[in-house]
């Protein structure tokens, strides 16, 4: 299994990820693994809480 390190993540983004993971009863690591692998469900209310983090990370076209 390969590890992934994300540098320079803002405190706000980390807080949103922590909150979204907690809503699902998951660690941040497991929450992010599910999101990256594409097998993560979206917790209730997550769309607005984490959408900003996803939008910030999206590459520009």
Image (spheres, helix red, strand yellow):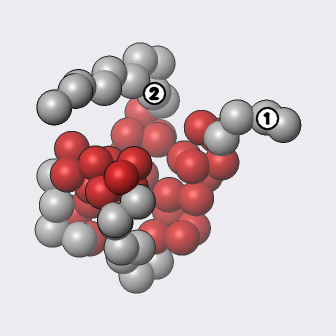
Residue marked by disc 2: 9
Query: Could you say which disc has been placed on residue 17 in the image?
Result: none
Query: CB of mark 1 within 8 Å of CB of mark 2?
Result: no
Residue found farthest to the top: 7
Residue 18 at x, y = what percent? 29, 51
Vertical relation: 37 (above or below) 24: above
Q: Secondary structure at mark 1?
A: loop
Residue sitting at 60 percent across and 38 percent down?
A: 57
Residue sitting at 32 percent across and 21 percent down?
A: 5
Residue 29 at x, y = what percent? 21, 44
Residue 21 at x, y = what percent? 27, 59
Vertical relation: 12 (above or below) 39: above
Distance between the Cα atoms at labels 1 and 2?
A: 18 Å
In the picture, the quarter occupied by the C terminus is: top right
Q: Earlier in the sequence, mark 1 or mark 2?
A: 2
The nearer-to-camera label among 1 and 2 is 1
Q: Looking at this view, is 48 or 38 the one in front?
A: 38
Residue sitting at 46 percent across and 41 percent down?
A: 13
Q: Is residue 19 left or right of residue 45?
A: left
The quadrant where residue 47 appears: bottom right
Query: Could you say which disc has been placed on residue 60 in the image?
Result: 1
Task: Rate crowding at label 2 as few (under 14), some (14 to 19) or many (20 or more) other CA atoms within 10 Å.
Answer: few
Q: Is residue 17 left or right of residue 52?
A: left
Q: Exactly how many numbered labels are in the figure?
A: 2
**Residue 19 seen in this snapshot:** no
């Amino acid at each position: 299994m390969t590890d992934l390190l994300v540098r320079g993540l803002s405190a706000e983004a980390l807080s949103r990820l922590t909150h979204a993971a907690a809503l699902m009863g998951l660690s941040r690591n497991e929450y992010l693994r599910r999101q990256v692998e594409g097998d993560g469900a979206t917790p209730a209310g997550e769309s607005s809480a984490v959408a900003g983090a996803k939008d910030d990370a999206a590459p520009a076209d």
